[in-house]
Image (spheres, rainbow, N blue to C red):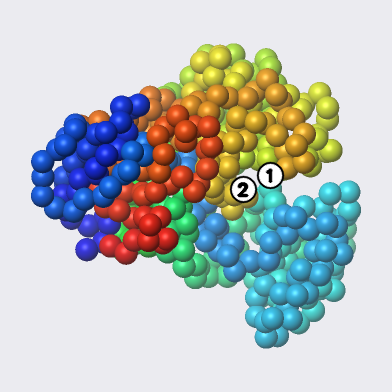
Amino acid sequence: MRPTEGAAAALILRDVEVAGRGGLDVRIEGGRVAAIGPRLAGRGAELDGRGGALIPGLIDHHIHILATAARADSVALETARGLADVAARIGAAAARRPAGAWIRAVGYHEGAEPLLDAMALDRMAPRHPLRVQHRSGSLWILNSRALGAVLRGEPAPACVERGDDGRPTGRIWRGDAWLGERLGRTPPPLAPLGARLAAYGVTGLTDTSANTDAEAAAILAAAHANGDLPQRLMLMSGGDLEPPPGVRLGPVKVLLDEARLPDLDALVARIAEARDWGRGVAMHCATATELAFALAAFEAAGARPGDRIEHGSVIAPEAVPQIARLGLTVVTQPGFVAERGDRYLAEVPVGDHDNLYRLASLKRAGVRLAASSDAPYGEPDPWTAMRAAVSRRTASGAAVGEGETLAPAAALSLYLGGFARPGGRRRRVAVGARADLCLLSVPRAEALRMLDTELVAATLVDGRVVFERAAGRAVAA
């Protein structure tokens, strides 16, 4: 029996802390919390909580599941130091693969150097088709072998950049859907990712990929149904989508690119189309200009509960009250302060440093605020992101927007909102609630002081144990 099939067997969690009260037992039946109290009677399996806190399972409210799983077989370039290091890493990957085998690299950033093109990649991997993804996720760069494989001698679409000579440069902007069609879709193994996330206490995922179609949705739904991806799923998409059984349908994802902003009336019409489908709208806003454009569109079309700002990477002070007035939710990535903060301090104008990935100022203004990883563009460990929300420190120890720090309990709460209203009312361990739970090895007060992944003792989805640290692995259903 897989985690998402049928009714879960009865389970009693012994000696756990619930909402600050220790020494309690929790009985789970049919995938829900059936009773909470001391020394509960019952038959069936038992799990000794040893005084640890029992909290709702965490939800990563913005992740790209298939891309994160594919990353495991990719060349990581996030920490590459300049073009020579990029070339060395790709060259090493080429040496391990037979000629003609594809190489995929992710996390590339050009820094002060010229942006890569097909000719530069040809020198790095002359015998392999190579594609390199920019860290922004908006750009793929292909070498000549890869270009030939996807173009097939046919006319190139608008997403394929051309040089002054009219020939493709190798750069493909916002062309994921077209690339997917040309390359074919071979889904990466999802079980390792599902197990990794379960070890973090993650029981829910919102996939925010704009290119999710019926095929991708079916792949994810199947992985959920067979237990490879035990987390509950909500899927966004860039267009209309019929969700497969067992999967929630989320807002329509709108990718805004400052260099190619659409006509405002067209964006307002797109919001109206999402309303016709009965869905909210989630706007990708990584710059202050993109955010201003999104807010103008929501002002014109009217914002509704469930509408979201994704990232909110740069939020000017004057935008905060407007976001609050419109009732928008901001789903941000506090982990980026730790992961990328030093680079931000070097590259972002000083006047914007306090505007990066705001937290506390949004909460003070009454904005619904939730957190996420944006994996594979960020690390999927939510506990690392919580610590970053509390410290606002970069890898080198520098501060980024110290006025935006959150208390540990508020940082944890960023992952406790529901699918429909991230940043809204926190889910709680209560009778009748779904048994999507995270058992910690210590009481809540101690866990808040540490905010460490290693504190996750067990993770339950639908009342089934999908990870148990005592076993050191995901638990087979």
Is 250 drawn above or below residue 123 in the view shown?
above
Provide residue 185's location: percent of width, then percent of height.
50, 68
Badge 1 marks a residue whose secondary structure is helix
Q: Which of marks 2 and 1 precedes in the sequence? A: 1
Mark 1–mark 2 CB contact (< 8 Å): yes
Quadrant for residue 314, please give it. top right
> Is residue 145 shown above or below 176?
below
Question: At label 2, which amino acid type do we have?
Answer: Gly
Residue that label 1 marks:
339
x, y percentage for residue 165? 87, 63
Q: Look at 43% across and 46% down and name the residue there.
A: 456
Is disc 2 placed on a helix, strand or loop? loop
Q: CA distance from mark 1 to mark 2?
A: 8 Å
Picture coordinates of residue 46, whole percent (x, y): 21, 50
Across and down, in percent, residue 308 comes to 51, 31
In the image, what residue type sits under mark 1? Answer: Glu
Determine the residue positioned at 22% across, 57% down.
5
User: What mark, if any, has residue 378 been given in the picture?
Assistant: 2
Task: Work out whether residue 447 or residue 216 is closer to the camera in this orientation and state it.
Answer: 447
Q: Which numbered tag is attached to residue 202?
A: none
Q: Is residue 439 visible?
A: yes
Foreground tag (1 vs 2): 1
Q: Is residue 104 left or right of residue 466?
A: right
* Residue at 54%, 47% in the rendered image: 381
Graded by Cα atoms within 10 Å as few (under 14), some (14 to 19) or many (20 or more), the crowding at tag 2 reads many
